[in-house]
Image (cartoon, helix red, strand yellow):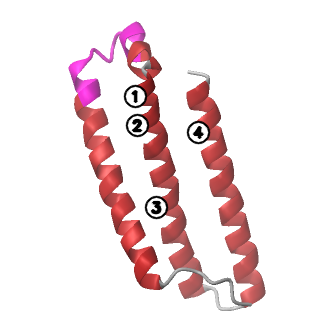
Amino acid sequence: MNLNLPSEKVLWILQRASAVLNLAIIVYIFFSLNVSNLLDHSLTQLWLEQNFNKLILFILFFSLGLHASLGISVIIHDYIHENKIKNIVLLGKNLFIILFWSFVGISLYFI
């Protein structure tokens, strides 16, 4: 079964790009939260309620999910050789990632 997947080089570049994006966003969040007083619940909640920060958090969690998904896919392809089991594990991984992204989106919407 040929699914016309992107080449390994494209996936490798995508995983490295998501790692750099994750690092940049985590550094922004660290310095942004370091400026505010994290011991004050109302200030932290105000930081979370800003639309720009919600967007940054959504991008971070989307990128983290993508990065994890790509890494786990490589492990699955390297160590599981029976196609039927490989497809079932990949389907489970993809469903988990979709549920993760849905949960993150809904959670950030209700903040």
* Residues in magenta, as a range: 32-44
In the image, residue 76 above or below residue 71 = below
Query: What amino acid is labelled 3 in the image?
Result: His
Q: CA distance from mark 1 to mark 2?
A: 6 Å
Q: Which mark is residue 56?
A: 2
On the image, numbered disc 4 is attached to which residue? 104
Q: Is residue 42 left or right of residue 66?
A: left
Check if mark 1's residue and mark 2's residue have beta carbons within 8 Å.
yes
Please identify the quarter of the rendering in which residue 38 is found.
Answer: top left
Q: Earlier in the sequence, mark 3 or mark 4?
A: 3
Query: What amino acid is labelled 2 in the image?
Result: Ile
Residue under the point 45% across and 24% down: 51
Q: Which mark is residue 67?
A: 3
On the image, numbered disc 1 is attached to which residue? 52
Q: Secondary structure at mark 1?
A: helix
Q: Mark 2 or 3, which is nearer the eye?
A: 2
Say whether residue 37 is magenta. Answer: yes
Q: Earlier in the sequence, mark 2 or mark 3?
A: 2
Check if mark 4's residue and mark 1's residue have beta carbons within 8 Å.
no
Q: Is residue 39 left or right of residue 51?
A: left
Q: Mark 4 or 2, which is nearer the eye?
A: 2
Q: Earlier in the sequence, mark 4 or mark 1?
A: 1
Q: CA distance from mark 1 to mark 3?
A: 22 Å
The image position of residue 67, as x and y in percent, is 46, 61
Q: How many marks?
A: 4
Query: What amino acid is labelled 4 in the image?
Result: Val
Q: CA distance from mark 2 to mark 3?
A: 16 Å
The image position of residue 54, as x and y in percent, is 46, 30
